[in-house]
Image (cartoon, grey):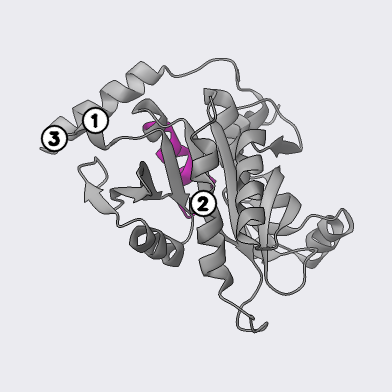
Amino acid sequence: MIPLLRHNYHEKISIEKIRQDIYEAAKRNGVILNEEHFHGIVILALNVPMLHRLLQMTNAREVPWIYRMRPLYEGYIGNTPVNIIWAAPGAPLAAYVMEHLIAIGGKIFIGVGTAGNVALDGMHIVIPTGAIRDEGTSYHYIPPSEEVSASKEVVSALLMSAKELNIPVKTGLVWSTDAPLRETPSMIETYKKRGVLAVDMETSAIFAVAQHRGVKAGCILLSGHEVQHPLPFDLREATIKIALNSVKYLQKSP
């Protein structure tokens, strides 16, 4: 049997163990963690320019954390505190970051990143309702299947946010792959015929980890090639605004 299909998906590494590992790592590195800086809503930046703008728009500041090269930030959306962290590139890294932040109290995750077009043309903001699992990480978390769904509550919050801001978005499936240089013409054509909107590297793993751990997750992606398609307005800024504005809807989520 293929190794990815051998896992016992119901078996969990306990959150308590991961949390203990976090505090032991902090102690080894001389880091004093403050739980007042850890929050239930986490924004996963899946693109460096997105990260920088997210930090600016939330007046974020770095807080003590165990990753030296991947800081954890605390920002505010209105009066609501959120954590922000760079969680890319790739599915394994996104999952690793999520596991640690779930262990310190993360309950709702919003991935904000970029993607390449599949069935789309031009530049579009995409809110995935699900993702095709063409990466290895998700198979360690949930049973084998072709697709994994986003959390309905997060998708709904993102859609309500987009409607309120009067920003058009696309919804549907995306394709997540570990091998961005193996997006062959035949594969692209296959998924284009199925109406798959875009391709990225992290979305399917983010959704799978959330399902495994019983938390909520959704993503919003800017898909296309900006240089080739001049924009009537800054869609990168619009993508981030939708994500941040969705937090007020997610606050009401149980």
Q: Local crowd at mark 1 within 10 Å, few (<14), some, or many (≥20)?
A: few
Q: Looking at the image, do the residues carrying marks 3 and 1 touch, with CB atoms under 8 Å apart?
A: no
Q: Amino acid at mark 3?
A: Ile
> Regarding mark 3 in the picture, which secondary structure is present there?
loop
> Regarding mark 1 in the picture, which secondary structure is present there?
helix
Q: Is residue 137 visible?
A: no
Above-or-below relation of 165 to 122 = above
Q: Earlier in the sequence, mark 2 or mark 1?
A: 1
* 45 relative to 62 in the view: left or right: right
Q: Position of residue 62 (x, y in %)?
A: 24, 51
Disc 3 to disc 2, how far (Cα)?
Answer: 32 Å
> Regarding mark 2 in the picture, which secondary structure is present there?
helix
Q: Amino acid at mark 2?
A: Asn
Q: Is residue 101 visible?
A: yes
Disc 3 to disc 1, how far (Cα)?
Answer: 10 Å
| Residue that numbered label 1 is attached to | 35
Disc 2 to disc 1, how far (Cα)?
Answer: 25 Å
| Residue that numbered label 2 is attached to | 245
Above-or-below relation of 66 to 225 = above
